[in-house]
Image (cartoon, rainbow, N blue to C red):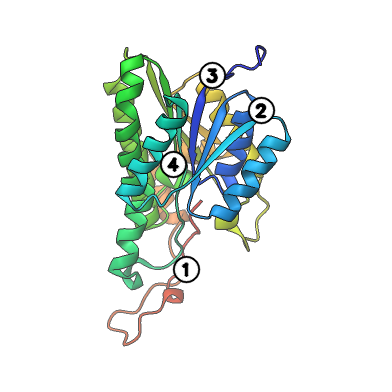
């Protein structure tokens, strides 16, 4: 264990039943962390935990619904009861969206914001006091390139929010011993992007970036790297982004039936 940079540290990874979360849990375990897997799907969590333990790592599962405040409190309580502390928090749980905002139900709006943003805030708020008391900890939140480049009113709003929350918290905690970082992935091969036509890298590229941020904290990492020029372009020339991302078809005013396919939008990463 001595040659592993995260040996003995306790890492909580949300949304770890598949995709980026599962890859991150495996990566942190390889680095020596004791990994807590949190997500809704108990059977998938068991599969990931078994894979980690078969590779010689340590894994503990806590089924958690990030839209439920009681579940979030229970997650933190169970981890503290088992390990005594939380050293690393990876806020990864999230859902994607590809429908026109005008046809999105109020219930889906609440679900998206609660899962992608409010859950991040609640869990960070619950974990932070212990980290501050020990003057040590790492918080990494998974945002998106869609948190830089506005592609979907609902999804982008939550990811802009994750970035704003994390970067502001980072400034507030300077000198505290607790690092706060953001990872903003572009299109990554996962359940959220299943069926997409473009070639996409696997979630391991994001997992490695997250592990690197635990060991060597930075403000933000955009990955894969070929998305960085796009982010810079959006910030420097937003009008160009307006042109490039203009819908191919617009909704007709006054139409009797509003359908999601009346507007073609870029799928959110």
Q: Nearer the viewer, residue 239 or 213?
A: 213
Determine the CA span between mark 2 and mark 1: 42 Å
Determine the CA span between mark 4 and mark 2: 24 Å
Q: In this figure, which residue is indicated by the disc labeled 2?
A: 30
Q: In this figure, which residue is indicated by the disc labeled 4?
A: 143
- In primary-sequence order, the first of circles 3 and 4 is 4
Q: Nearer the viewer, mark 2 or mark 1?
A: 2
- In primary-sequence order, the first of circles 4 and 1 is 4
Q: Nearer the viewer, mark 4 or mark 2?
A: 2
Dot label at residue 215:
3
Tell me the element at label 1. Answer: loop
Percent coordinates x, y for residue 6 in the rendering: 57, 20
How many numbered callouts? 4
Query: Is 187 rendered above or below residue 227?
Result: below
Q: Nearer the viewer, residue 135 or 156?
A: 135
Determine the CA span between mark 4 and mark 1: 23 Å
Tell me the element at label 3. Answer: helix
Check disc 4: other Cα within 10 Å, few if <14, some if 14-19, many if 20+. Answer: many
Determine the CA span between mark 3 and mark 4: 19 Å
Percent coordinates x, y for residue 51 in the rendering: 69, 41
Q: Is residue 261 visible?
A: yes
- In primary-sequence order, the first of circles 4 and 2 is 2
105 on left or right of 269: left
Q: In this figure, which residue is indicated by the disc labeled 1?
A: 264
């Amino acid at each position: 264990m001595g040659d592993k940079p995260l040996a003995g540290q306790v890492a909580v990874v949300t949304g770890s039943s598949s995709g980026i979360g599962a890859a991150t849990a495996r990566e942190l375990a390889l680095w020596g962390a004791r990994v807590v897997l949190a997500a809704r799907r108990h059977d998938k969590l068991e599969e990931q935990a078994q894979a980690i333990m078969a590779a010689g790592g340590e894994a503990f599962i806590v089924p958690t619904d990030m839209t439920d405040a009681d579940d979030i409190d229970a997650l933190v309580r169970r981890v503290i009861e088992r390990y005594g502390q939380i050293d690393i928090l990876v806020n990864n749980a999230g859902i994607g969206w590809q429908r026109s905002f005008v046809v999105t139900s109020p219930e889906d709006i609440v679900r998206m914001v609660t899962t992608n943003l409010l859950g991040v805030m609640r869990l960070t708020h619950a974990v932070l006091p212990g980290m501050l008391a020990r003057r040590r900890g790492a918080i990494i939140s998974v945002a998106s390139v869609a948190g830089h480049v506005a592609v979907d009113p609902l999804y982008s709003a939550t990811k802009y929010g994750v970035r704003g929350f994390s970067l502001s918290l980072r400034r507030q905690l300077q000198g505290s011993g607790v690092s706060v970082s953001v990872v903003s992935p572009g299109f990554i091969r996962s359940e959220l992007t299943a069926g997409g036509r473009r070639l996409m890298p696997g979630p391991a590229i994001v997992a490695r970036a997250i592990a690197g941020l635990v060991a060597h904290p930075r403000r933000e990492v955009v990955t894969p790297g070929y998305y960085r020029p796009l982010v810079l372009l959006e910030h420097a020339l937003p009008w160009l982004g307006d042109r490039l991302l203009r819908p191919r078809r617009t909704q007709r005013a006054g139409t009797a039936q509003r359908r999601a396919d009346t507007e073609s939008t870029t799928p959110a990463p």
